Image (cartoon, rainbow, N blue to C red):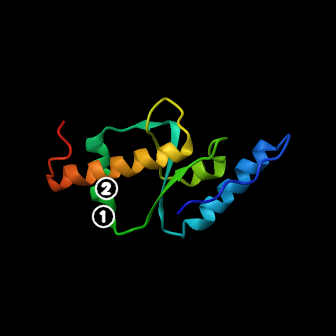
Amino acid sequence: MEIPLQPRGKNPDIARLREAEGERMLRAAPAGTRVIALDERGELLDTAAWSGALRQWLQDGRDVALLVGGPDGLAPACRARAESCWSLSRLTFPHPLVRVLVAEQLYRAWSLGAGHPYHRA
């Protein structure tokens, strides 16, 4: 589910906007949801680690929310609620590109776990 950005006018209060976006993201993740924050300061995982995490998620049966911040990053409340904080790279990406990277990485993680030849490492 995509949470729309707060409108930004001239001279926006970035901290307030980031907090409002974070509150909306957390409201969209029901109690019991495994929350993972995606942040450039998070833990760098390889594909095998993503595959292991995906396998664990499937066994747990809990919903998973991968939180991606807007142009001003994640609210501190999002990082505080997260069970894990992962990084796709030490680079900063535009959040629409992150959605594509995450979708591809989830497919790659699934294919590795399923023995599918898509992942050839």
Q: Quadrant of residue 44?
A: top left
Q: Quadrant of residue 88?
A: top left
Q: Position of residue 50 (x, y in %)?
A: 32, 47
Residue closest to the far right: 11
The residue nearer to you, when weighing 44 against 103, is 103
How busy is the neighbourhood of tag 2: few (under 14 within 10 Å), some, or many (20 plus)? some
Q: Position of residue 33 (x, y in %)?
A: 48, 65
Q: Position of residue 74 (x, y in %)?
A: 62, 46
The residue nearer to you, when weighing 6 against 82, is 6
Label 1: which residue? 58
Count numbered badges in the picture.
2
> What residue lies at 28% left-to-right and 65% top-to-bottom?
59
- Height in image: 97 above or below 54? above
Q: Quadrant of residue 25?
A: bottom right
**What is the number of the mark on residue 54?**
2
> What residue lies at 41% left-to-right and 44% top-to-bottom?
101
Mark 2: which amino acid?
Leu
**What is the number of the mark on residue 27?**
none
> What residue lies at 64% left-to-right and 52% top-to-bottom?
77
Q: Are marks 1 and 2 in contact (CB under 8 Å)?
A: yes
